Image: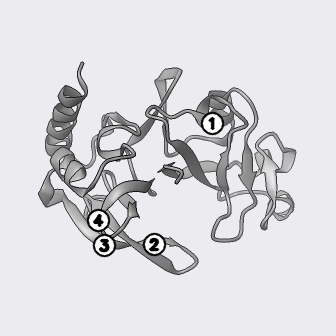
Amino acid sequence: MSRSSFLAGLLCVVAVTPASAQALPALDCTGPFARDANESTVAATFGAANVTRADIPIGEGYTEPGIVVFAGDDARRIDILWRDATARAQPATVIFRAGSTWRIAISGLPDKPVALGATLEEIEAMNGKPFSITGFGWDLGGRAMGWHDGKLAHPVGGCTLSLGFDHGPNAPPDALEKVNGDVEFLSSDAAMRQVKPVVVEMMLNWEP
């Protein structure tokens, strides 16, 4: 299938799929999220009426100008920050927040896209080795992006993937205390596994 055919099919899917459906296609770093994409590319893919310019939260109370796709639909919402904010071009970060039903395609894992709700153990198995994750309890807590050249280091299209985890609601207090703060852990750390982290945010990033 050609890239243009894929984008046309994607536009059809997102136009007719109900918010409650769980069968959205797996996305990657091509088409509307390619390094050279822009606001027009995104609008052509998802429909101009579904694209809104907005200030996007980036943590610690800060925002940056970007666009939101499907702003009123948590299941399909996508936040995009630009490398060139003035021209609204060159995606820097594409963010899928809590509630999203989009999935991320990974090179070498055609039948196993990354999705919200995946457990720490599931992500480690997909990566093929332990990965790095920051401690909890601060704005950048639970952030995984150090894949140690595992499979998750290679999303389709050539960008990088980072994931945001949150610990389980019944995490043992003593284990949680051990994995709190601005410290980097491996996913294989015993205390980290005890707090049962799950994926609550996904980000596709283009390096400068």
**Circles 4 and 2 in contact, beta carbons < 8 Å:** no
Residue picked out by circle 2: 57
**Circles 4 and 3 in contact, beta carbons < 8 Å:** no
Mark in the foreground, 4 or 3? 4
- For marks 1 and 4, the one nearer the N-term is 4
- For marks 4 and 3, the one nearer the N-term is 3
Mark 2 closeness class: few <14, some 14–19, many ≥20 residues within 10 Å: some
Which amino acid does the dot numbered 2 rest on? Pro
Which residue is at the front of the view, 208 or 113? 208
- Above or below residue 194? Residue 50 is below
Mark 1 closeness class: few <14, some 14–19, many ≥20 residues within 10 Å: many
Residue picked out by circle 4: 87
- Above or below residue 163? Residue 122 is above
Mark in the foreground, 1 or 4? 4
The quarter of the displayed image where residue 134 is located: bottom right
State the separation of the CA atoms marked 2 and 3.
9 Å
The numbered disc on residue 54 is 3
State the separation of the CA atoms marked 4 and 2.
20 Å
The numbered disc on residue 123 is 1
- Above or below residue 193? Residue 95 is below
Which amino acid does the dot numbered 4 rest on? Ala
State the separation of the CA atoms marked 2 and 1.
25 Å
State the separation of the CA atoms marked 1 and 3.
31 Å
Mark in the foreground, 4 or 2? 4
Which amino acid does the dot numbered 3 rest on? Ala
Q: Quadrant of the N terminus?
A: top left
Element under disc 3: strand
